[in-house]
Image: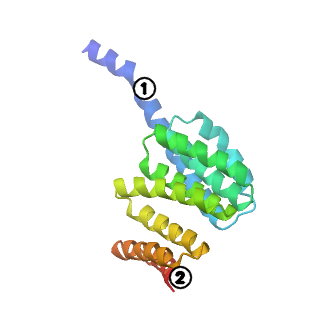
Amino acid sequence: MKKTLFFILLIYPFIVFSQNDKFKNQLVYNQLIELDNYSKQKDINIDLKLNKLFGKIQNSKSDSLKGFYFLILANTLSDQLKKDEAIVAVSKSNQYYNKANNFPGIAKSWMNLGNIYLNRGDHDKALLYYNKALEIAEEKSLQKIMGWVNKNIGVVFMNQEKFKEALYYSNKSFKIFTSIDDKKELRCSLIYLI
């Protein structure tokens, strides 16, 4: 009985610490989701909000959380036309997602790198990173990411006036979003088919 009680008292702090760590990670994750939504709305205060979270991210043991932070940072920097800084941030995101074996995160970071190069007008590099994202998304059956990447590849070909290829990838995107009944993304895919 004493040994059991001693053992419980010995491991109790580790259990509590582990649960507290998970709780802290969930709180930070929720804050990152909120910031991701702000970044999509072009919130001008997002830099301040990201900086406030940086200390919490550094202390986190979750590589997925760090990857998500740097992905949002990359999107924000890209929106601010700080493309070189965005490339560094998305590369960090990819490194953390790779450490965590977080395949959706890896695919999204490759896709975002493709987006940065697409916005720069570097279609070859955009296609390179989109194809890396697509390979992972197809391998892991990440339907929504497959739809996004196919749509983006269609945009690259549209910009290059390769209309047959653009239509092919836009159609693939349309079929994927139809199959998963994602009406919002389906509408976006339709725009490129018209």
Would residue 24 be seen by someone viewing this image from the given angle? Answer: no
Residue at image x 43%, y 72%? 173
Identify which residue is drawn at 55% across, 71% down.
157
- Image coordinates for residue 141, horizontal then vertical, percent: 34, 58
The extreme top residue here reads 2
Whether residue 7 is visible: yes
Amino acid type, mark 2: Ile
Q: Which residue is mark 2?
A: 191
Quadrant of the snapshot with the N terminus: top left
Residue drawn at the location 63% of the way across and 65% of the way down: 40
- Horizontal side of residue 98 vs 71, given as left or right: left
Q: Describe residue 192's horizontal placement relative to residue 134 as left or right.
A: right
* Residue furthest to the bottom: 194
Numbered disc in front, either 1 or 2: 2
Q: Quadrant of residue 56?
A: top right
The residue wearing badge 1 is: 14
Up the image or down, 79 lies above or below 30; here it is below
Between 134 and 75, which is closer to the camera in this rendering?
134
Q: Residue at x 65, y 60 (%)?
A: 122
> Badge 2: how crowded within 10 Å, few (<14), some, or many (20+)?
few
- What is the CA distance from the residue labelled 1 to the residue labelled 2? 53 Å
Whole-percent x and y of residue 70?
Answer: 61, 47
Farthest-out residue, left: 1
Give how far across and how far down residue 16 sits, in percent: 44, 31
